[in-house]
Image: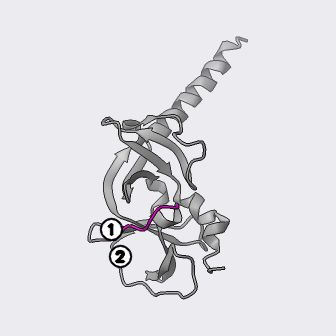
Amino acid sequence: MSTKKPQQTLNQKKASTDNRQTSLAVLGVAVGEDRYLVPMTEVSEVITIPKLAHVPLTQPWFLGLVNVRGNFYGITDLGVYLGKDSSPFNQKSRILLASPTDKLYGGFIVNSMLGIRSLAEFTPVKAVRKKLPQGAIKPYKDAEGRLWQELSLFALIREEKFLQIARG
């Protein structure tokens, strides 16, 4: 038996996995001046900003609750949650709804949508900072040289900080 064949199979599997990752559909969004790429598999719906039910004594990044088709979503100002200054929302602003499990629901307000893209359009770059923002997977550059961060909403929803909305 040749030992090359299993190695070729392993390399083919790795190439197949790499191709799936680079062809992953991502949603481009702007949060303030920053650009993010969110995997489409993590976005259940994109909605305009409705009237939110305010919840007193919560973190500054927690904006309130909204009922979408019988599910309550806690709505987060994504920029403030990531440690940025709050940016005003306008008619281009949207809420990205995400639900990694049947019991966890989160909505993230972004300043504007920048379209659905393929991750293959971007080139991975070394992290500019030693520590990436919470939920950030890795940085990329587009053809024009602009910096983007791939961001996992599911990772944010599962963070202890996200689950503790009470001001303390």
Q: Position of residue 5 (x, y in %)?
A: 64, 16
Q: Position of residue 6 (x, y in %)?
A: 67, 20
Question: How many numbered marks have been drawn onto this rendered protein structure?
Answer: 2
Screen quadrant of the N terminus: top right
The part of the chain drawn in magenta is 83-89
Identify the mark nearer the N-term, 1 or 2: 2
Q: Position of residue 102 (x, y in %)?
A: 59, 71
Please state which amino acid type lies under the numbered disc 1. Answer: Ser
Above or below, comparing residue 132 to residue 32 in the picture: above
Q: Secondary structure at mark 2?
A: loop
Residue placed farthest to the left in the image?
A: 91
Which numbered tag is attached to residue 49?
Answer: 2
Please state which amino acid type lies under the numbered disc 2. Answer: Ile
Query: How many C-alpha atoms fall within 10 Å of the one at disc 1: few (<14), some, or many (≥20)?
Result: some
Q: Are marks 1 and 2 in contact (CB under 8 Å)?
A: yes
The residue positioned 46% from the left and 52% from the top of the image is 39
Above or below, comparing residue 131 to residue 82 in the picture: above
Which numbered tag is attached to residue 93?
Answer: 1
The residue positioned 59% from the left and 71% from the top of the image is 104
